Amino acid sequence: MSNSNQETVIIGSGLGGLVCGVILAKEGHRVTVLEKNKQIGGMLQIFVRDRVIFDTGIHYVGGLDKGQNLNILFSYLGIMDKIRIRRMAMDCFDAIMLDGDPIVYKFAQGYENFVQQLLQHFPDEEASLRAFCQGIRDVCNSFPLYGVNAGSYADMEGAHAISLVDFLKSVTSNQKLVNVLAGSSLLYAGEPEKTPLAPYALIINHYLESSWKFVDGGSQIARYLAREITQRGGRIIRHANVTRLKEEEGKIVYAECEDGRRFSGDVFISNVHPAQTLQMTETDKFRGAYKNRLAGLENTVSFFYANVVMREQALPYMNTNLYVLEQDDAWCGMNYTDENWPQSYAIFYSATSRQAEYAEGITVMAYMRFDEVKDWAATFNTVDFEATRGESYKAFKERKAQQLFNAVERKIPGFKQAIKSYTTATPLTARDYIGTEDGSIYGVARDYRQPLRSKISPRTKIPNLLLTGQNVNMHGVLGVTLSAVVTCGQLLGLDTLVEKIRKG
C-alpha cells in the first residue's frame, strides 16, 4: 500500500502517465512526470496546419454521457466539466462501406437504435443482432473495472481466450452481417486468426453507449490533466529523455536522462512500452524468460496517415466516421500489396469550434507495415530534432497519399478537388514521436490462442517499478485510463481507489 508524501517519478507523459500522476497527486504523492518531447500527451498530441487542428491519434471517444464509465473517470480526475466535446450522429456514428455494395451500414448509438438501424438491411437477422448485443454486454459485465466497479476480474480472462470471429459466427451465419459487425476493425487492428473477443467487445460497447468528438482536438485532455498535477504540487519536465533506470538493493533509486540529469524517487511508473522499459533498467532481477517474453511480443500493425486541410466550404462536414473496405471482407486491410493498397481505410472529420457545416480538416488512415519504410529506419525526425529523410522518402509518401486520395475519391466524389493542402505520416513518424520501435499505434497484439503470453502485469520483479499504458490493459482513451487505475491500485488498493472514483 502507498504512503502519502512519496516521491513518485513517472516516465512518459502519455495519457497513462498523466492519469497516474493525477491519481497519485490527489493521494499526496510528490509527482514528477518526465517527457522526452516538447509536447506532452503521447497520442493525445495535436498539430496545426493552415489554422486547422489535427489529432495524432484520438479521433473519437465513447462513454462520456452522464453515468457512463469514462464520464465517471474524467469527473474524478477533475476534467469532465472542462473538456469541449460534440456528440456524434445518433443514428450513425460509424458507417461501414463494403466493396461493390451501395448500402451504407450504420452503427447507431444505443443498443436498441443499433439493432433497428441494421434491421433495415438485415430484416431476417433480428435474433442474431440481439444475440450479438447480449454477448457484448455479457463480456463487459464480466469485467467489473470496465464499469468502474470493484470486484473480481478473473472472469474477464475467459473472453481473452475466445476468438472474435468464432463469436460473430456463433450469432449469425450471414457472412455479410459478420463483415459489417467487424467492419471497424481498424479501431483495434483486428486479425481473424488472432483477435480475441474481449478487446472488441469493450471497444464496441464503449461507442454504442455514446460517441463523441473532441472539439479542437484531444490535447485538451493532456492539458487539463497536467494542470491537475501541477496544481497539487507536481511537476512536468519536458525534454527529459530517460535512458536508464538504476537499481540498487532490489529497488530503483533514480531515473537518468540522456543529458545526465537524475531524478530520485520512492516509486517509479513507466508509461513506456514494457520491452523498452526493461532495456533501460539496469538489474539482474528480471529472469531471462520474462525478458525474452516481453522482447518477443508482437506489436500491432502501424498506419499511414494523410491529414488534409479542405478548401473553405468545399465539402460538407460529416458527424460520422467512415470505414471503407475494398473487399466484402472485414479483414482485408492487412492483406495488401504495393499495387492494391489500401484495402481498407478510415475517414475522420475534425471537429472545430468555428463551425460544423463544412469540413475544415479530414484525416484518412490505412494500415501500413513497418517494413515498407525500413529503408529510412536509421533516420529520426521530430519537431524538436528536425532532420530530413531524403527525397526518396518524400516521393514514397507522395505516391502513397495519391493512392489513398484516389480511393477516397471513389467513395466521396469531389474530395480531391476540395483539398487545399495535406501532410502525411508513416510508421516512422509514430516511432519517433510515440517511442514504439516499429511505430505500432495500439501496442501489443492480443492472441486468443495464447492469452497469457500477451498478458502484462503492472507489477514487476522490482517492487517500486510499475508499468502502465495501453500494453497493460487495452488501448484507447478508456483502456489507457483504466490501465492507470489498475497501476495506481497496486499502490493504493484497487477496491479502495475504485470506491473513491465512484464517489468522485
Image (cartoon, helix red, strand yellow):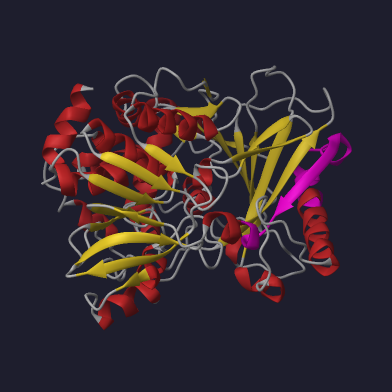
Q: Residue at x 20, y 26 (%)?
A: 502
* Rendered location of residue 50, percent (x, y): 79, 33
Q: In the picture, which quadrant includes the C terminus? A: top left
Which quarter of the figure has residue 319?
top right
* Rendered location of residue 234, percent (x, y): 35, 36
Q: Is residue 396 visible?
A: yes
Residues rendered magenta in the picture: 406-429
Of residue 49 and residue 368, the one placed in the foreground of this image is 49
Q: Residue at x 40, y 59 (%)?
A: 165
Of residue 23 and residue 299, the one placed in the foreground of this image is 23
* Rendered location of residue 233, percent (x, y): 33, 31
Question: Residue 91 colored magenta?
Answer: no
Q: Is residue 327 visible?
A: no
Q: Residue furthest bottom?
A: 288
- Where 173 falls versus 378 (above or below)? above
Left or right: residue 399 versus residue 379 is right
- Where 437 falls versus 25 (above or below)? below
Q: Residue at x 84, y 30 (%)?
A: 311
- Where 99 falls versus 222 (above or below)? below
Q: Residue at x 32, y 65 (%)?
A: 448
* Rendered location of residue 85, percent (x, y): 51, 22
